[in-house]
Image (cartoon, rainbow, N blue to C red):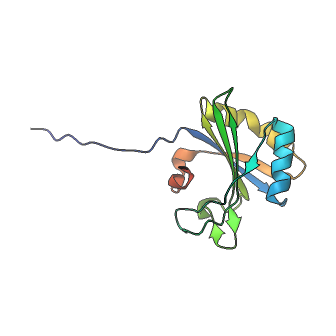
């Protein structure tokens, strides 16, 4: 008799961009809103899975027309890092929804063109050990 195993995994179908910038979160948010025609709005700070303290900045924009959700999350705070795996990123732009991974790739040239951005890079979520940190509820 053969054994059957059931594997349960999270749904990691989102795009993730790391952004290195010395700008304050509100300044970066304003510039992304201008360049990408978004309307990112500040929400309550969120916590990481490591720390229960809600110390990381969080901006959200829901694009109902394209069925996309944008989250700008700060990686650094006085409590430490949102994820220590990618310390070179000051912020993360998380895209959820239809074709989120493709849209993340399309956003890179716009983000890299921002004056306050030092560099922006796409992150392969499946290779992240801390990918569960980006499952937002």
Residue 70 is drawn in which quadrant?
A: top right
**Residue found at the very far bottom of the displayed protein:** 78
Residue at 56 percent of width and 46 percent of height? 125
> In which quadrant of the rendered view does residue 3 lie?
top left
Q: Residue furthest right?
A: 115
Q: Is residue 61 left or right of residue 132?
A: right
Q: Residue at x 32, y 43 (%)?
A: 7
Q: Nearer the viewer, residue 41 or 4?
A: 41
> 123 left or right of 31?
left
Q: Quadrant of residue 87?
A: bottom right
List x then y, in percent, for residue 133.
54, 56
Q: Position of residue 2 (x, y in %)?
A: 14, 38
Query: Where is residue 68 shown, x and y percent of the image?
Result: 65, 34
The residue drawn where x is 51% and y is 42% is 12
Q: Which residue is rendered at x = 69% and y = 73% of the image?
A: 78
The residue furthest left is 1
């Amino acid at each position: 008799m053969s054994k059957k195993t059931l594997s349960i995994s999270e749904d990691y179908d989102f795009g993730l961009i790391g952004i290195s910038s010395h700008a304050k979160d509100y300044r970066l948010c304003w510039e992304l809103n201008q360049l990408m025609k978004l309307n990112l709005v500040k929400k309550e700070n969120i916590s990481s899975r490591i720390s229960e303290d809600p110390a990381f900045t969080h901006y959200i924009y829901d694009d109902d027309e394209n069925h996309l959700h944008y989250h700008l999350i700060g990686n650094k705070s006085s409590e430490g890092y949102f994820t220590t795996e990618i310390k070179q990123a000051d912020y993360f732009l998380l895209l959820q929804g239809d074709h989120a991974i493709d849209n993340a790739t399309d956003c890179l040239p716009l983000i890299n063109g921002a004056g306050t951005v030092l560099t922006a890079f796409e992150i392969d979520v499946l290779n992240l050990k801390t990918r569960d940190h980006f499952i937002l509820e």
